[in-house]
Image (tube, rainbow, N blue to C red):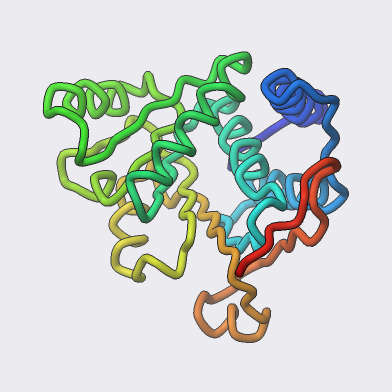
Amino acid sequence: AIVTTRTARESIGTQLLAALSADRGDDLRLTEDQRGAIEAILDDLEGPSPMVRLLQGDVGTGKTLVAFAAAAAAAAAGYQTALLAPTELLARQHAAVANRLLAGSGVRTGLLVAGDPVATRRAVRASAAAGETALLIGTHALLSSGTEFARLGLVIVDEQHRFGVEERARLLAKGAGEPHLLLMTATPIPRTIAQLLYADISTSELRALPAGRKPIRTV
């Protein structure tokens, strides 16, 4: 179990919000949906069984901030997190945001994508294997046999419908014991269908947009 004290829980949220507010030049607050999702995830992380939770929410509802809160909790307890993204562009975006938001928490982040030079990828993998990187973000490069972790405790899969069961299993197999699993999607999945796809899954849904965030319109 990834144990967090009440003080640690409050500190995680406060530090992330402070960093995000400074980054955007505004006084931001967690939505009730975000707050509830973070609490549910941290409860799962402290439980006796590995978490399998689906985090649903439209673009702009703040799923990434919730995921980073989970990664920060894992890091505070001495565990590493792997965040799997379907494209290099999305992985780089996540890494850029993570570097800005988590630096003040002392959470060292890394980026592993096929488009980087071999020497860069070698250094990133060495850092993860040594346990120096607390949050490793990447694409399918995370799944390769050359990517190892010292103490992987949490796996986050963004746009989870873009990955198969075998791919998720390969990443989970790199963990210490059986890591917790957080799946993220912007595509609503009814709970009954989710339970058919993933045994014993829990769900959290983000409906409200953070203050100041405008709804995403598609044309």
Q: Residue at x 40, y 50 (%)?
A: 85
Work out which quarter of the rendered image holds the C terminus and state it: bottom right
* Image position of 127 (left or right of 89): left
Q: Residue at x 40, y 36 (%)?
A: 92
For the residue pair 10 and 200, the one nearer the viewer reads as 10
| Residue 186 against residue 188 in the figure, above or below | above
Residue 134: image x %, image y %?
A: 45, 27
Q: Residue at x 39, y 34 (%)?
A: 136
Q: Quadrant of residue 83?
A: top left
Work out which quarter of the rendered image holds the N terminus and state it: top right
Residue 113: image x %, image y %?
A: 26, 39
* Residue farthest front in this picture: 219
Image mark count: 0
* Residue farthest left in this picture: 118
Q: Residue at x 83, y 31 (%)?
A: 28
| Residue 108 against residue 48 in the figure, above or below | above
Residue 177: image x %, image y %?
A: 40, 47
Residue 128: image x %, image y %?
A: 31, 27
* Image position of 78 (left or right of 204): left
For the residue pair 155 and 22, the one nearer the viewer reads as 22
